[in-house]
Amino acid sequence: MGSNHNSQGDQNDEIIVFSIINPSVCSECGAELTQGRFLKMEKEKPLCLECADLDHLVYLQRGNVALTRRSRKYPNLSAVVVRFSRSRHRYERQGLLVESEALIRAEKECEGDAADRKISREYAVRVRERADKEYIAQFSKQILMQYPGCPTQEAEAIADHACQKYSGRIGRSSAAKAFDANAIELAVKAHVRHKHTCYDQLLMKGWERTESRSAIAEKLDQVMREWN
Ligand SMILES: [Zn+2]
């Protein structure tokens, strides 16, 4: 299942994510990846989306050409999802992972188009569950206590993402674990990395996570100090 796209720094390179057929295990966190889950190969090793720093993206199944094109119109982080076809012995595109903001914007643009409206609802597969408002309110309050300089809107976005993550994975009752100071720091750092540094652009250029992380480390520290 190797992909050699990492070896080139070509700007036209796409980040490839595999929709897996055989169960696998993330080489970094040990998470079990069952059939149908997504996986990224890095240095020949499988990574779950969270470890690959792609877990904030939402899945858009292929089928709606207009919506797909519009989702990628802006320079956002995105990845192509492929799956191996046993009958045809080749990898086939299944869809895209895109930023939720990019998908929402693309859907709005498609709504201008009466014919596309129905189709866009049909094909936009939301991986995320509906957010629990109270949980988000609590979480963002915790974030603001720990990082008073963080803009309220961004604290809500961070809490919203954490809510989706924990609700899907370990059940809402265990979500309280997310209020742990260390978990909050990790969530805030991940957000700053994606939104306040050129981290995503570097990933899109084919840079590896470790290189990208050290390239943006100073900027990340700067924002964290401003928010602290
Ligand atoms: Zn992992």
Image (cartoon, rainbow, N blue to C red):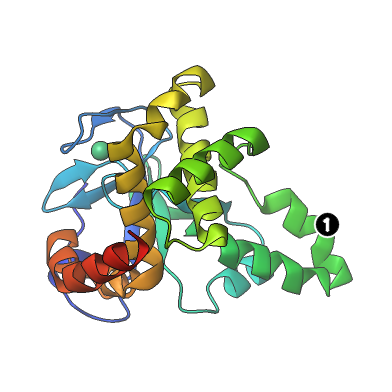
Q: Please state the horizontal and vertical placement of residue 200, each as a whole percent of the image.
A: 34, 69
Q: Please state the horizontal and vertical placement of residue 92, each as a whole percent of the image.
A: 42, 54
| Front one among 119 and 134 | 134
**Residue at 18% from the left image edge and 72% from the top image edge:** 218
**Residue at 83% from the left image edge and 57% from the top image edge:** 118
Q: In what element is the residue under mark 1? A: helix
Rendered view: 20 above or below 206: above
Rendered view: 96 above or below 187: below
| Front one among 162 and 95 | 162
**Residue at 40% from the left image edge and 36% from the top image edge:** 37
**Residue at 46% from the left image edge and 72% from the top image edge:** 76
Can residue 179 be seen in this snapshot? yes
Q: Residue furthest top?
A: 173
Asked whether, in this view, residue 190 is left or right of residue 119, the answer is: left
Tally of numbered tags: 1
| Front one among 41 and 133 | 133
Asked whether, in this view, residue 47 is left or right of residue 161, the answer is: left
Cβ of mark 1 under 8 Å from ligand 1: the answer is: no
Q: Please state the horizontal and vertical placement of residue 225, each as a whole percent of the image.
A: 27, 65
Q: Quadrant of the C terminus?
A: bottom left
Rendered view: 215 above or below 34: below
Q: Quadrant of residue 73?
A: bottom right
Can residue 35 be seen in this snapshot? no
Q: Please state the horizontal and vertical placement of residue 75, each as a whole percent of the image.
A: 46, 78
Q: In the rendered structure, which amino acid carries the disc numbered 1?
A: Lys
Asked whether, in this view, residue 119 is left or right of residue 105, the answer is: right
Q: Residue furthest right?
A: 114
- For disc 1, the neighbor class at 10 Å (few under 14, some 14 to 19, many from 20) is few
Q: Which residue is mark 1?
A: 118
**Ligand 1: which quarter?**
top left
